[in-house]
Amino acid sequence: MTDRNPQRNAPDGLVKGGDRLPQPRTLLDALIVGVLAAVVSLGGAGRPSFWYDEAATISASYSRSLHQLWQMLANVDVVEGLYYLLMHGWFDVFPPTEFWSRAPSGLAIGGAAAGVVVLSKHFVSRNAAVASGVVCAILPRATWAGIEARPYALSMMAAVWLTVLLVYATCRATAWLWLSYGTVLTLSVLLDVYLVLLFFAHVAFICVFQRRQSVRTGFAVTSAVACCIMTPFIVTGIGQAHQISWISPIGHQTIEDVTIQQYFDRNPPFALLSALVVAAAIALWLRASAQLTDSGRQLLVLAIARPISTISNG
């Protein structure tokens, strides 16, 4: 589909609305979708009993003092350290019941769905952006993460908003936006070390679409500083890799994990329905002989590069 809007086809990544922060209407849409997502996840969050990974969260965050938690992280689970610290503060306010232990995850799914709306609205129409957020809210893997007292939902939210910051930083290229991106990148990796893989998706986006030297320089400097800060943490995490040595190495199972488990939590009907929707969209696109706009190509690169970067996760 061709687009005569000169802003949408502007060079160097300046897509529609690219020189402005999210508008009130976009933020309202994001808020509504975020509330919907949180309600979907938290509706029955108090019913399933804790399973053993969640019990580890309770043990680390509620049953230990800060000093004991620090001693534990020196030996195991340093990659979960920031999450345990956040949950330690949470349990100072709320009881360690099933619902309240999972509430941060449910709220984080709301934040992730809201971020999807903001990110998508930068590239596509309002209807498409809202639909994207709703899909994020009801994905089986998202609702699973939303009722689990583990850091996965928070890392999902961090990944989305980190990408939002990247997109707006490339458009405005201001020092405070690059500082915000670097700060959130560092905190995101501290929250989930595998989010370092998202950085490579961002590198692909910069390399393909950004020709302005100021953008490339800002991204390179920010990334270099963030990597220096994160290096001791990553080295420590690698030193504790023995605790997950039982996980299967990359193989044929990895393909299923990335294509089905990552999004659909081994839910074949949902995966099949999603595949049919995607196939129908491709068929309509081919039938109309439409061409992707510049903004559509940028969104496509971000959407494809992200799951490819997770293959190393196993």
Image (tube, rainbow, N blue to C red):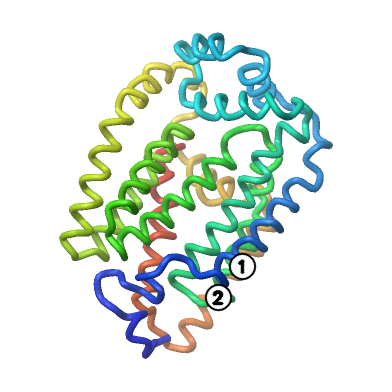
Q: Quadrant of the N terminus?
A: bottom left
Farthest left residue in view: 213
Q: Which residue is mark 2?
A: 126
Identify residue type, mark 1. Asp
Image height check: is 94 above or below 176? above
Taking the spot 44% from the left edge, 30% from the top edge, the residue there is: 249
Tell me which label, 2 or 1, sits earlier in the chain: 1
- Residue 68 falls in image quadrant: top right
Q: Which residue in the structure is indicated by mark 1? A: 29
Dot label at residue 125: none
Give the image location of residue 230, x and y in percent.
Answer: 33, 30
Residues marked 2 and 1 touching at CB (< 8 Å) = yes
Res 105 quadrant in image = top right
User: The residue under label 2 is which amino acid type?
Assistant: Arg
Gap in Å between the C-alphas at discs 2 and 1?
9 Å
Where is residue 226 drawn, in percent x and y?
Answer: 30, 37
Q: Is residue 272 visible?
A: no
Q: Is residue 183 above or below residue 237?
A: below
Image position, residue 188 (x, y; %): 44, 39
Q: Residue at x 45, y 12 (%)?
A: 74
Secondary structure state at the residue bearing disc 1: helix
Kindly state the secondary structure of the residue where label 2 is placed.
helix
Q: How busy is the neighbourhood of tag 1: few (under 14 within 10 Å), some, or many (20 plus)?
A: some
Label 2 packing within 10 angstroms: few (<14), some (14-19), many (20+): some
Q: Residue furthest right?
A: 47
In this image, 27 relative to 288: left or right?
right
Q: Is residue 21 something that shows in the picture?
A: yes
> Quick check: 279 above or below 218?
below
Residue at point 58%, 45% (across, down): 261
Q: Nearer the viewer, mark 2 or mark 1?
A: 1
What percent of the width, then of the height, locates residue 205? 31, 59
